[in-house]
Amino acid sequence: MKFIHGGDIYSREILYDFSANINPLGMPDNVRRALRDNISAFERYPDTECRELKRAIAKSEGVETDNIACGNGASDIIYRLVRTVKPNRAIIIGPTFSEYERALTKEDCKITAIMLSEENGFEVTDAVLTQIHDADMLFICNPNNPTGRVIKPEITAAIRRRCVENGILPVIDECFMDFVIDKEKYMSGTDKNTVIIKAFTKNYALAGLRLGYALCGNTELIRRIEDTGPCWSVSVPAQTAGAAALRDKEYLKKTARVIEAERQYLTAEMRNFGLKVYPSDANFILFRCGLPLDKLLLKEKIAVRPCADLAGLDNTYFRTAVRLRRENAALIGAVKKIMRGM
């Protein structure tokens, strides 16, 4: 299977990129200042222990520094974790982010997919519980990419209990949680039986710098994750940017408010065209269209994410990021032009 991702602005002429789910507010100002003011430090090797960064993450997350493993983005953490655990069997709740499958496949792991129902908007319900067995590891994304649905906290708790009962390591990807209103209700607490994956990539618009981390109460597992893979995987600019980003307490609150308003705008406008738009709690929307909309929008220099490569979806499914109003209005204008021309 060919694994593809959004954000390919290099092989095409793109004016508006809705294919990558990056914070439309851009990099926080204090991060820009920190990078500018510390540029001479970029001549040195990075701190392999990410000490300053881990102290900032620990303070933000309410954990100890030895409960944190840092890496070159969430994908790096996923691959390190899989290489560390070396599961024989794993469960993926999908349709979801393709890198889970890719990382597991590279370790010759047998994968069982629990596919969510289109009829109920791809919501994770307690129906998945009976299917969680006979595995070493389980991947679940909350809120899920590409569907955008956040999981009810009681369902997340039940999944974690079910995993513990069956000797399965649950891995919860919360990379898009900061875009959710009232995110505190849905976040998973850290314990010894669960790995939580987060990143600065999307929420702080640091996709080009690459920075992610894992949280787990099992300090031995955390250390093994860090020992798997090359040294110096987190650059000095990335460590500098991450520590600075966590000092801005208002940026993510503002982000969640902007995303909620713009998501509602995009959803309403797209439904006016008769498109099937699924409920979302994140900074992107999954929708359905019978036209090859991705190709048609490229003529307008606009990129959205086709989802035919994701298990459980086909070429009628597309994902669009939620951007700022000027960009969102440009997308809606282009879709209107396409729909009226058909």
Image (cartoon, helix red, strand yellow):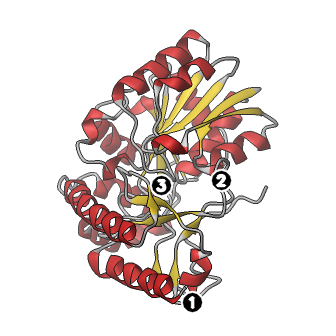
- Left or right position of 101 against 151: right
Residue 188 visible? The answer is yes
| Residue type, label 1 | Lys
User: How far apart are the two marked residues, 3 and 2, measured between alpha carbons?
Assistant: 24 Å
Tell me the residue that label 2 is attached to: 310
The residue closer to the viewer here, 290 or 318, is: 290
Q: Residue at x 56, y 30 (%)?
A: 223
| Residue type, label 3 | Leu
Residue at the limit of the structure toward the left, as seen here: 250
- 208 above or below 153? below
> Which SS class for mark 1?
loop
Would you say the residues marked 3 and 2 are in contact, meaning their CB atoms lie under 8 Å apart? no
Q: Residue at x 57, y 47 (%)?
A: 96
Tell me the residue that label 1 is attached to: 299
> Which SS class for mark 2?
loop
| Residue type, label 2 | Leu
Which of the two discs, 3 and 2, sits closer to the camera? 2
| Pointer 3 local density, CA inside 10 Å: few below 14, some 14–19, many at least 20 | many
User: How far apart are the two marked residues, 2 and 1, measured between alpha carbons?
Assistant: 24 Å
Residue 20, percent from left and from top: 49, 67
Residue 245: quadrant of the picture: bottom left
> Which SS class for mark 3?
loop
- Left or right position of 220 against 327: right
Upstream in sequence: badge 1 or badge 3: 3
| Pointer 2 local density, CA inside 10 Å: few below 14, some 14–19, many at least 20 | many
Q: Residue at x 26, y 33 (%)?
A: 185
User: How far apart are the two marked residues, 1 and 3, measured between alpha carbons?
Assistant: 33 Å
- 92 above or below 300? above
Tell me the residue that label 3 is attached to: 211
Residue at the limit of the structure toward the top, as seen here: 165
- Left or right position of 198 against 93: left
Upstream in sequence: badge 3 or badge 2: 3
